[in-house]
Image (tube, rainbow, N blue to C red):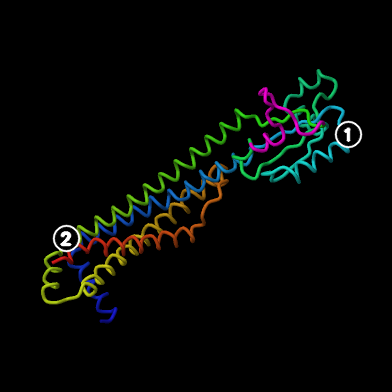
Amino acid sequence: MKLGFFLKEALRSMRRNPIPSFAAMASVLVTLLVLGVFIPVVQATTGAANEVRDKVALEVYLKPDVTDAQIQRVRDRLVNETEHVESVRFVSKEEAYKRESKRNPEAYELLGSNPLPDSFRITPDDPDNIQAIRNALAPMTPSGERTVVDPAIDEVKNRKEETDKILTATNVVKLAMGVLCGLLIVASALLVSNTIRLSLFSRRREVEVMKLVGATDSFIRWPFVLEGVILGCLGGVLAILLLAVGKIAFVDPLAEDFALISAPETMSLPLLALLLMLAAIVVSALGSGLSLRRFLKV
């Protein structure tokens, strides 16, 4: 049987049952609108969390009388012998003094001299590995105190309390966004499937008659699957148009005035539109096919 026949039957079914068809399309429309807003929000939130995590660093303070040879030796150890180190940046005591004196000029003017040491700022390959780096550079002794692996190192600090707060907060944000996204996808699939099932329920007699006269399951299923795909496409197109209008009319003008809106890097509108259309087609087709299974058991 040709595709044109199934398409004609799907369109005829939509005309004969306008209310269930409209309900299915409206469900897809609302679902995709929510997803279209939620996906950029999740991306922006996750991006902000990653930016905060990337600021986690370890400070290796050197002794006041350290020589250039000792500085190079410590640098080589950090770069070549320490695991989980992504980058190492040397901060001279002059640079540290200049930076801190800008933050608190009155206090540093009273000192008269530079009390700050040379240091290395270590960025880990993963923020969760920062404690492992500290343990490698300043291992614990049997007495419970920390020692250092090089005599030129005075102290290793990772601002544990601040680091733990950052890691905990960002992990909670990512977990919450992941759970919410998963729940939304499941709820969307169930909503579309149940709405299409109501549409099929209104035509259950027609399905039963077709089964009794010898129609195959595929012959019965394809018009309903195509109907679901058509309704999904219609809902997807309307949702994308509304999202585009909202972006042009509200988001873009606000982004020019508010850095909070323009700063996060999110998915482009064409890619988001493609993703939403694919989701609409797949969910609607699966919802139609799965919802029809019970009506094919005659």
Q: Position of residue 245 (x, y in %)?
A: 43, 55
Determine whether the residue tagged by mark 1 lies in a helix, strand or loop. Answer: loop
Q: Which mark is residue 236?
A: none
The quadrant in which residue 284 appears is bottom left
Find out whether residue 295 is within the magenta segment. Answer: no
Q: In the rendered image, which quarter contains the N terminus?
A: bottom left
Secondary structure that dominates the magenta span: loop
Residue toward you, 98 or 56: 56
Vertical position of residue 256 compared to residue 279: above or below: above
Vertical position of residue 116 compared to residue 191: above or below: above
Q: Position of residue 89 (x, y in %)?
A: 76, 41
* Residue under pointer 2: 201
Task: Say left or right for 64 vs 184.
Answer: right
Residue toward you, 30 or 163: 163
Q: In this picture, which residue range is highlighted in magenta?
A: 132-151
Vertical position of residue 29 compared to residue 10: above or below: above
* Residue under pointer 1: 67
Q: Amino acid at mark 1?
A: Thr
Foreground: disc 2 or disc 1: 1
Q: In the rendered image, which quarter contains the C terminus?
A: bottom left
Q: Position of residue 146 (x, y in %)?
A: 70, 27
Question: Which residue is at a point 56% across and 31% down the rendered structure image?
Answer: 165
